[in-house]
Amino acid sequence: SRRLSLLLQLERRARAAKGDELAFLIANETFGLVPYRQAFLWSGAPQERILAMSGIATVERNAPMVAWLEKLFGTIARSDASGPRTLTVQDAPQAYRQDWSEWLPPYLVWLPLGHGADVLVLGRETELAESDRQLLGFLVDAYGHALAAQRPRSLTARSLNLAARRKRLIAAGAAALALLVAFLPVRQTALAPAEI
C-alpha cells in the first residue's frame, strides 16, 4: 500500500539524514504518513528543549510559545505515565490549561522515540485511529535509532566501557599466567627419617 511504502521511505531517509536535517525531517515529513496540525521534536537531555517544530526552519528560543511548550513538555515527561499516549487539556497541570487553546489543538499525541529522552509530539484536531497508531509505532522506533546513532556517546559511557575492557584484559592476563605456571616443571623432594 502507499502508506507502507511511505513508512519505509521515511525510515530510510531518517537513517541517512545528518544533524539538523534529521530533526527537521521528523517534525515535518511525518505529516505524509499521519496528518497533524503541529509537530514538535522535544528532548529531555542534556537539557529540556524543543529541537524542531513543523513549518519552521529554526526554533526561536525566546518565543513565548516555545518557552511555554518546553515547560509543559518537561512536566509531562516527569509525570508517572510513560510510553505513547494521547493528552487533552484535562490531562495538563492546572497552570497550563488556560493557555492550551491558544498554543495547541485539542489532542496532543506523545510519542517517545526509543529508549532515549527524545519525544515526538503531534498536535491534532482528532484522536489517532488504531492504524495510525501502529504505523507511528514502527516509525518512531526508526527515528529513535537514527537519533541515537547521531549522538556522540557520553564521556561516562565511554569511561565505563574502558573500565570494563580493562577488567576483562586483567582477568584474561591472570588466567593466561595461571595456565603458564601450570606447565612449568616443579622439582619435588621429600625429607623423611630413613635407616640404612
Image (cartoon, rainbow, N blue to C red):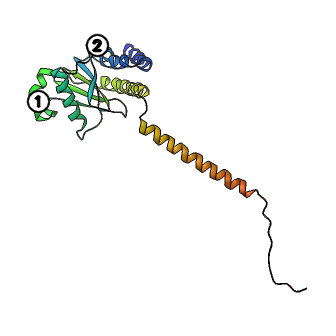
Front residue of 27 and 164: 164
Q: Position of residue 156 (x, y in %)?
A: 42, 39
User: Where residue 38 appears, x then y in whole percent?
Assistant: 23, 18
Is residue 104 in sight in this rendering? no
Residue 113's spot in the image, x, y percent?
34, 29
- Above or below 169: residue 12: above
Residue that label 1 marks: 97
Return the residue found at the far right.
196
Residue type marked 2:
Ala
**Residues packed near mark 2 inside 10 Å, few (<14), some (14 to 19) or many (20 plus):** few
Q: Is residue 165 above or below residue 33?
A: below
Q: Is residue 47 above or below residue 31?
A: below
Which quadrant would residue 68 be assigned to in this image? top left
How far, Cα to Cα, is label 1 from label 2? Answer: 28 Å
Determine if residue 34 is in view. yes
* Residue with the most extreme bottom position: 195
Question: Which residue type carries mark 1?
Answer: Arg
- Residue 161 located left or right of residue 20: right
| Mark 1 nearby-residue class (10 Å; few <14, some 14–19, many ≥20) | some
User: Which corner quadrant holds the N terminus?
Assistant: top left
Q: Residue at x 10, y 35 (%)?
A: 94
Q: Is tag 1's residue or tag 2's residue first in the polypeptide sequence?
A: 2
Q: Which mark is residue 57?
A: 2
Q: Residue at x 54, y 48 (%)?
A: 167
Q: Is residue 155 left or right of residue 76?
A: right
